[in-house]
Amino acid sequence: MKAINCLRAVAAMLCVMLLAGCWDKIEIEDRLFVLSIGIDSAEEAEHQISEDKYTLSFVSPVVDQIKEGPGPAFRTYKTVNRSVIMSLSQLLERFSKKQFFGHTRNIFFGEDIMKDEKLLKEILDGISRYHEFHNSMYAYIVPGRAEEVFKVKPMYDKLLAPYIAGIIENSDYTSKVIKLTFSDMIIMLENQKGGLVIPKLVPEKEEVKINGAGVLKDYKLIGYLDDQEAAVYNWLTNKAKGGTIEVVYNDISTVFRHYTFIRKIEMPKMEGGKIYLNYNIEAEGSIEEYMMGKEILDNVLLNKISREVEKKIEDESEKLIKKFRQEFKVDLIGAKDYLSKYQPKLYKTIENDYEKFFTDNIVIKVTAKVNIRRVGLIK
Amino acid sequence: MIRNNDTISPYQLAIIIIMTVISVEAFSLAGDAASALGTDGWIAIVILGIINIFAVLFMIKLNSIFPGKTIAEYSQIIIGTIPGKILTSFFAVYLIIVIAYVTRAFTEVIKMFLLFRTPTEVIMLSLILVCTYIVRGGIECVARINELLFPILFIPFLIIILFGLPIMDFSNLRPVLQTPAGKVLTSIPRMIFSFGGIELALYYIGFMKEPKRAYKPLILSVLFLIFFFTMIIVFCIAAFGAKTITKIIWPLVSYIRLISLPGVFIDRLDGVILSLWVLTVFTTIVSTLFIASYSISKVAGTNENKQFVLPLVIIIYYLALQPVSIAELYEWGSIIFPYAVAAFIYAVPVVLLLIAKLRKLGVKQNESN
């Protein structure tokens, strides 16, 4: 009895403490929830004073229009200023409501910001220092200007921000979408000394598309990955979950859907100053599409198709590894991560000159193992 | 059985020590550990914890020579009245500085995340003044408030912190055990402050009926602290990586900010955790302030300690407002505390025990002679 009373008291106190909201005495009606932010470097024509560096665009929902209002469900506005935080406080001079960034879901970086090391570093510092931003918001790069995203009128959704965030959350089902939260971005930039792979968002008239990714080196944009390369990047960094791979077998295009996709790295040997790394990839899934009238439920056939898929995975992976080694000359595909975590003694000897070492002396071999478990509903 | 309201039970002793040691430094602990030892940061805490188990054994040994007496009383027997009083006053001064430091550090955290527009003075005074009310109630009150708040704090905290598992990548803890032993040992003094507070056992054991029964609760409480601190460090490093974490002032708060509960009905958990964390800072101040006023009463030779509590508030408040910025606060902390904590946890009990043994003082010796 005593224990029960004690539990009751604890439960009551927990309710009091956990369910108490609104500690800063700002009513929900007085807040203007900013759902997405776009950051560009300011164009000459936009300058109000010559020091202006950034153009920030914001999007907020219009609460009374969301349900059934005839008007647009969100409103966009922008400011031009010297720094992020200055722009945020400038908004207070223009709006009766107080902007609230606790529920910001997306942050878009314009291409020009990503090309300028100083601008990017300033903005990242400002955002990670400001307590109101939620670090689990998603980050994107937009080719051209980030404010273009806010001109999109989404076809199927009322609101823009949940629509875009929803696409990113599809990364569980398609490996072509790279998922990157703001905190992941900061961690990756810190660990890779300015290297980053950030999803590319292409705005169109009535929709947006996540299409490939931008690659940064030393806080500067150095190139883009296309759609397929983004998927391969997810494979190589062990971030892929679900997704589809298409192979052509006997002139029939066959679709393999994987539910799990696991990448493991091992170092079999070190010879003549070269490090040999094996990327072992293991995928498991089912065949989703073949050809009417042809049976696929046949062990020999399935084995042959798996070999095809394996070959495709290996080829694509090696192509991307080559691209990172020869074109970008930066290791964002996990080799450095592996060496520093699992071969710390070896890594210490090559740490200072790692970039050169990566391009010249690391040999990466990809071995895939594909298991087709199911073939769907028909034979 | 009617309990005398001047004694505490072994269970209460354990809770008091746990709640005293865990306070505002838990927020920054993971960052300090990682900047000292990188991915091996948790090792320093484990080693320090094991050292502290021995320190606690010394304290109990010392106290069991003088059952029913606290260090403020038996130090006067061991090294003479005047040196004993000087030692006790040093203790009191140190504890007052600790309270001021904790109050200020916590106020800065609260102002950052919760109460942006509330004046610093109001947050501090409301925190300390509530504590004085408890402290004036005496040892029984202090023990009970600790006992009451312990489950309220730790059950929700442990539940919430586990929801961070999806954002953790435990390979971030690698490489394991690659730090040279010399570096590990030299980093330990930097971490001593994290266990600051167990020296209060020198006093609280004196409030127990039989000091012999203190072994189990005190060792358990140090083990709990090792577990708790290691968990915080491991989780934070797993979530952020050892490099990023050194750039964050309060890694634990940042970690909690990243957690989102499944089926999100509360999105931002930092508010919840910080309001819970008020309780642990509150208990730290309560048990420390009680001992500070108790020490002063023993130096002044009075029976009661109530009358010293309110004047102490003024001193604490004044001290807490001295550092200009959080940078200055942390700088002062890193100058004062490693030495003070080391002195009171390790040096004082061992030296007193040695002198007591040499002078063959205490109850037991008298009986056996």
Image: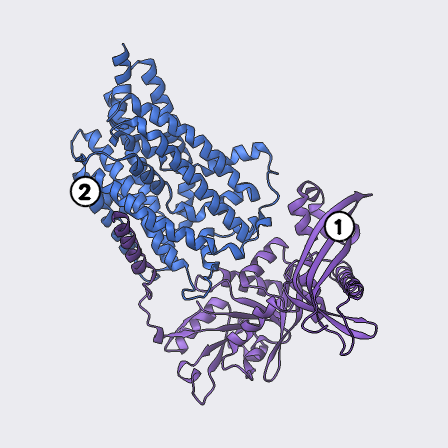
- Chain A display color: purple
Q: Which SS class for mark 1?
A: strand
- Look at the image and tell me in which quarter the N terminus of chain B lies: top left
User: Visible in this render: residue A25?
Assistant: yes
Where residue A283 appears, as percent x and y from the top left, is 69, 60
Where residue B174 appears, as percent x and y from the top left, is 60, 45
Assess disc 2: are there few (<14), some (14-19) or many (≥20) residues with their C-alpha within 10 Å of its C-alpha: few
Horizontal side of residue B113 vs A171, given as left or right: left
Horizontal side of residue B312 vs B329, given as left or right: left
Q: Is residue B24 above or below residue B207?
A: below
Which residue carries the number 2 mark?
Answer: B137
User: Which kind of residue does numbered mark 2 sit on?
Assistant: Gly
The residues tagged by marks 2 and 1 sit, at their Cα atoms, a distance apart of 67 Å
Judging from the image, what is the letter of the chain drawn in blue? B
User: Which kind of residue does numbered mark 1 sit on?
Assistant: Leu
Which residue carries the number 1 mark?
Answer: A277
In the image shown, does A197 or A42 lie closer to the viewer? A197
Where residue A180 appears, as percent x and y from the top left, is 58, 64
In the image shown, does A168 or A74 lie closer to the viewer? A168
- Look at the image and tell me in which quarter the C terminus of chain B lies: top left
Where residue B347 appears, as percent x and y from the top left, is 39, 26
Q: Which SS class for mark 2?
A: loop
Image point (56%, 77%), residue name: A147
Image point (47%, 81%), residue name: A74
Q: Is residue B20 above or below residue B247?
A: above
Using the rendered image, report if marks 2 and 1 lie on a common chain.
no
